[in-house]
Image (tube, rainbow, N blue to C red):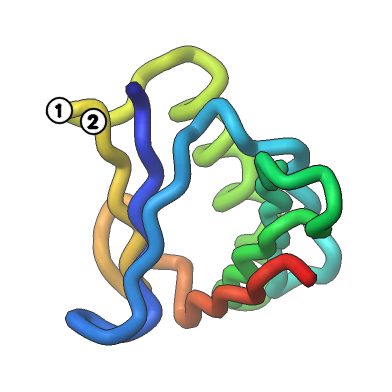
Amino acid sequence: MKMLHFVESAGTGENFFPAKNIGQIKVTAADTVVLLFANDDSDISSEIITLTTTSGKSDEVALRLAQEVGAGQIQYGGVLKIIAATAPFAAVSGVVYTAGT
């Protein structure tokens, strides 16, 4: 199974999602990308990861994520790790998780 690993804070704020659960990748501002993950419980809304990027780079970050997930090119071991200011997502400056309600 292909997984996405988002790191808000190493050791205390890490979330893993199956790549197949991505419902949408949205560029909502020049510095913001929002990922919506479908929730298995139909009574709970989508879980959300918000990525803050360098201004003007949100479209590039969204495209890179779409290419990695869509083409099945997730890194070795089937996990793509997204950490702020770390390659291949160096333009990401913040990662925030919002639980579905």
User: Quick check: 49 left or right of 4?
Assistant: right
Q: Which residue is mark 2?
A: 75
Identify the mark at residue 76; answer none if there is no mark.
Answer: 1
Counting from the top left corner in percent of width and height, residue 48 is at 68, 63
Q: Relative to 52, is 72 above or below? A: above
User: Quick check: 42 left or right of 8?
Assistant: right
Identify the mark at residue 100; answer none if there is no mark.
Answer: none
Q: Relative to 50, is 21 above or below? A: above
Q: Are marks 1 and 2 in contact (CB under 8 Å)?
A: yes
**Secondary structure state at the residue bearing disc 1:** helix
Q: At 56% across and 74% down in the image, what residue appears?
A: 97
Most extreme residue toward the left, as rendered?
A: 77
Compare residues 54 and 23 and report the one nearer the observer: 23
User: Quick check: 5 left or right of 57?
Assistant: left
User: Quick check: 70 left or right of 37?
Assistant: left
Q: At 72% across and 46% down in the image, what residue appears?
A: 41
Counting from the top left corner in percent of width and height, residue 54 is at 56, 76
Identify which amino acid the numbered label 2 is placed on: Gln
- Marks 1 and 2 sit apart, C-alpha to C-alpha, by 4 Å
Q: Relative to 49, is 4 above or below? A: above
Counting from the top left corner in percent of width and height, residue 45 is at 82, 58
Q: At 64% across and 37% down in the image, what residue appears?
A: 22
**Secondary structure state at the residue bearing disc 2:** loop
Most extreme residue toward the top, as rendered?
A: 71
Identify which amino acid the numbered label 1 is placed on: Tyr
Task: Tell me the quadrant of the picture where the N terminus can be found.
Answer: top left
Counting from the top left corner in percent of width and height, residue 64 is at 51, 39
Circle 1 crowding by C-alpha within 10 Å: few under 14, some 14–19, many from 20: few
